[in-house]
Amino acid sequence: MSDATHDTKGAEMAEASPGQKFQELRTRYIAGLPDRMGKLGDSWNRLLYVSWNPKALEFMYQSAHKLTGSGATFQFPEISNTARILEEQLQVLLAKSDATSTERQQIENSLKALERAIEEASRAGLNNEMPAFVSQTVMEKHQTHRIAVIEDDENQAAYLKNWLEQQGYYAETFEDPETYTQRIGGHFHHLILLDISFPQDALEGIDWLERMKCQAGTNTPVIMMSARSDMVARMRALRAGADIYLTKPIDMGVLEKRIHQLLDNARPVQPRVLWVDDDTDLLAYYKSMLSEEGYEVEGLSQPVRVLERIEQFQPDAIVLDHDMPGCQGIELAKVLRQDADYMTIPILFVSASPEARELLEQHSIAGNDFFQKPLENELFLSSLRRHLMNAKLIAARINLISQRKESRGLQNYDYFLTELVDLLAKIESDQQDQAHYLVQASVDRHEYLRAQHGARAMANLSARMEKHFAEQLAVGDSGCALGGGSFLFLVTARAADDCKTFLERFHHKLNNPAWAIENTSDPVTLSLGALTLNHAMDEDKALIEVEKACSKAMQSGSNNLIWQQATERPPESRLDDHIKELIAAQAFKLHYQPIVNMETGGTLFEALVRLVDEDNAVYLPGQFLPWLPEGSRGPFYALDRWVIQHAVEGLTHLDGKASASYSVSVKLSSPMVDVEHLLTVLSSAIRENRIKGNRRIYLALSSPTVLKDVPRAKKIAKLVQAMGCGLVIEHVATDTASVELLKELGSVDFVKLVPALGASAQQTPALEQLLHQLKSAFSSNLQIVVTGVEDAKALSWFWERGIRNFQGYFIQEPKGAMNYEL
C-alpha cells in the first residue's frame, strides 16, 4: 500500500473519535493478514520446489519480522509469538545455502502455527473493540483565555487583573517569577504579562524568562513590561524570548491590541516526530497513536528519502526502524549526526530483533533509546517526552560553547559579545594604524514583510543572508545574527582609509546581491547604523549607540546608512597611569565562564579576573598584569590571594539549591612556590565562609608553569586532594611532556586542552593520539575539557571520542552567570 493511499485513508478518519480511528486501523490490519500469509506460503513453496533463492528467503524473513512487531500492537499477541519463532528460524537459514530436512520441517510447523494465529485473529477481530489511548498531555480547555500577571507592585498587578477580567479573560497574579513557578503546578496559561524588575534583581524577569524558554514545552507567549525604555533592556528582553516589549505606564489600548495579536496568532506548537518504518500498517498505527498524544507526525516508508523529508519536515525527534530493506537505522543515524542541523535531534530505534540493542551506540548527541516491537506504548511515550526535553537542553548547551553553528557561518551572539569586549579592552587611546567599527544591519520593513509573506519566508531569507554575509566578511572581521532581520558586525579598516567611503562599500556589499523574498518580486533592502569604536566605551554603550544609528537610518527611508563617531577619551588621562591607579584601588572584578558537561548538564564555573574602571570599561589580564607591583612574593601573589578570597566568598551569596551545588575553578598565575603558600589562604577562606562539600573549589594551574617545578606540584596536588578540593591542569598540548606530567601528578580532576585544539582545522592525528593517551593512562574519573570549539561539526568530532566537557564564550558577572540554568 502506498504512502498516498494511507494519506487518503488518514484524511477519511480525521473526524472520527479516537476509538473509531484505532478500530478502523485494526480492521485494515486484519484485512491484510491473509495476503501476507499467502505471500509467505508462496515464497516458501518457491524455495522448496523451484530453487533455494536468497531473495525469497530474505523476503520471508522481513515479512515475519514485521508481523513480530505488529501483531501484539493490534492486540494479537499470538501472531507476534508465532512470527518471532519463524523469524528466528529464518534468520539461521540466511547464512546457509540450503536447509536440512529438520529445519524445513520446523519452518513448515511455524508457518502452520502462524496461519492458525492469523485465522484466529480474523475471527476475533470483529468482536473485540480496540480501546483508544487515554492522552496524558491533553490539557483542560477553558472557555476563556488564562493570563498570568507576574508583577511585584500589588496595585499594578490588581489593576491589570481587574482590567483583564473586564476584557473577558481569566487572570491570575504572581508577585515574582519564583512564585509563579512554584504555584502553577499543572495549570496552563495562554499568555504571561511579565515585569522586568523584581526585588531579587533589576533584570530578574529577563533572567527567569531565559531559563524558562530553555525548558521543553514552554512556548507560552510573553509580553514584557518595564519602566525602562533603553535599547539594551529591550534587546535583552526580546532575545530572552519575550514576544512584545511594552514600556510603563502601559497604554491599555496598545496592550489590548497586542494581547489579541498574540492570542489570535498563537497556535499550540506540537512537537514534530518523523517515523521511518517500511511496514505501512504499523506506520499508520504509530501516526494515530502519537497524534492523539498531541504530536505532529509524519510517516515515511521509504528510508532512502529520509534526508529529504527531514529537511522539509524539520522534526524534533526521529523514530527509526532498525531493520529496513537496503538500509539500517544505525546507518541513517550516523549520517544525521554529522550534519550540524540534525545532530541534536534525538533518535529512537525500534526493532523486532532483541539483538539489535547490542549494536546501538549513542548516535545522537541528544541521546538515543531502543524499543523492541511490539512497543509498550506508555514506556515509549515517556521516553519520547524525556528525549525531546533533553534535546532542547543540549541545543542550548551547544549554543553556549560553540563559536558558530557551522564552520562558514556567522558567530553565536555570546561569542560575538565576548569578542566585542576584548576588542574594546585592547583598543589603545593612541592607536593610529587601524579603525574599528561596530555595525548593525537591519532588514527594512521587516514587520510588514513578515506579515505579508510569513515567518518561514523571513527565516529562509535570514538564513540566506547569514550565509552570504559570512562569506563576504574579510579576515579579522566578524558578525552575528540578532534575529528579527538584524545582524551585528565588527569590521576593521586601515586608519588611512576614508571612513565614510569604507562604510559605504561595506553597505553595498551587504545589499549585493539584490535581496528578495523567495518566489516573489518584493525587494528587500538593509539599512545600516555604524559606530566608530574606541576605548572610551563599554559594550552596552556601544550596542545602544549603534542601534540608535540603525533605527535612525531605517526611519529616514530604506537602504540608508547612518555613521556615528564615538566620544573620545579625555587626552589628559593616559592608559598606563589609569591602569596603575585602578590596581592600587583594587578595582578588580570576577566574571565567570562555565565549563559545561553536555551530557549531564553539570557545570564548573571558572573565575576570571578583570579590572574595571568607573565607566565600566573592562581591562583584560594581558593589559594589567604587566603593571602589578612586585610585592614580597612576586607580582601575582596578591592578585591570586584576592581571587581566591572573593571566589570562595561568592559561593556564599548564592540562594536556594545553587548554594550547595555549584563549584568554582580559580585560576592561579603564581609560580609553584607561591601556590603552596596560597593553599593556606584557600583553607582559611573555605573555613571562614563555611563552604561544605567536596570539590566545591578547584585550583587551575597552567601546564607550562607546573612543568617548571614538578616536585612541588606533586606535593600541591596531594594537599589539594586532602583539603577536599579539585585540581585542573590547563593548556595541555599534544606534546609528550604534558601527558608525562599528568601521569606524575596523578590526582588531577580536569584537563583543559589548549584552545587551538578545539578548532575544526586542528583535528589532527596528534590530537587523536593525545586523547587516546589520556584515556589509556587515567581512569574514567579524569574529565577532559575542550575550549575554543568553532562549530557543531567539531563538537561532534570530540563527542565521538568520548569528550563531554566543553567551555565556551558565555561570560558574565557572578550572580548572572551562577544563576544561568540550561
Image (spheres, rainbow, N blue to C red):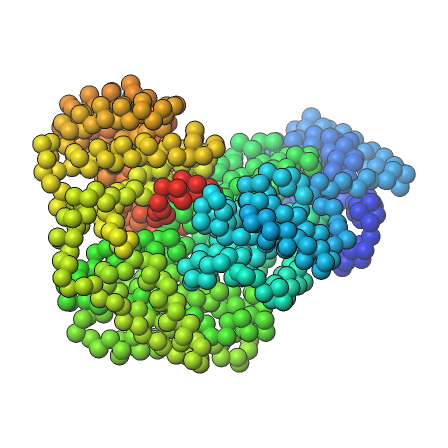
Q: Nearer the viewer, residue 229 or 340?
A: 229
Residue at image position (81%, 39%) is: 131
Image position of 714 with respect to 731: above or below: above
Q: Nearer the viewer, residue 551 or 498?
A: 551
Q: Which quarter of the rendered picture does the N terminus lie within?
A: bottom right
Which residue in the rendered view is the most extreme toward the top? Answer: 722
Residue at image position (30%, 39%) is: 607
Q: How many labels were placed on the picture?
A: 0
Which residue in the rendered view is the most extreme toward the right? Answer: 127
In this view of the protein, can residue 605 be seen by the observer? yes
Residue at image position (54%, 61%) is: 249
Looking at the image, residue 16 sits to the left or right of residue 290; the answer is right
Q: Position of residue 440 (x, y in %)?
A: 37, 68
Looking at the image, residue 148 sits to the left or right of residue 803; the answer is right
Q: Position of residue 344 (x, y in %)?
A: 49, 47
Image position of 130 with respect to 109: above or below: below
Q: Position of residue 34 (x, y in %)?
A: 81, 43
Q: Position of residue 647 (x, y in %)?
A: 31, 35
In this view of the protein, can residue 46 be seen by the observer? no
Image position of 817 with respect to 144: above or below: above
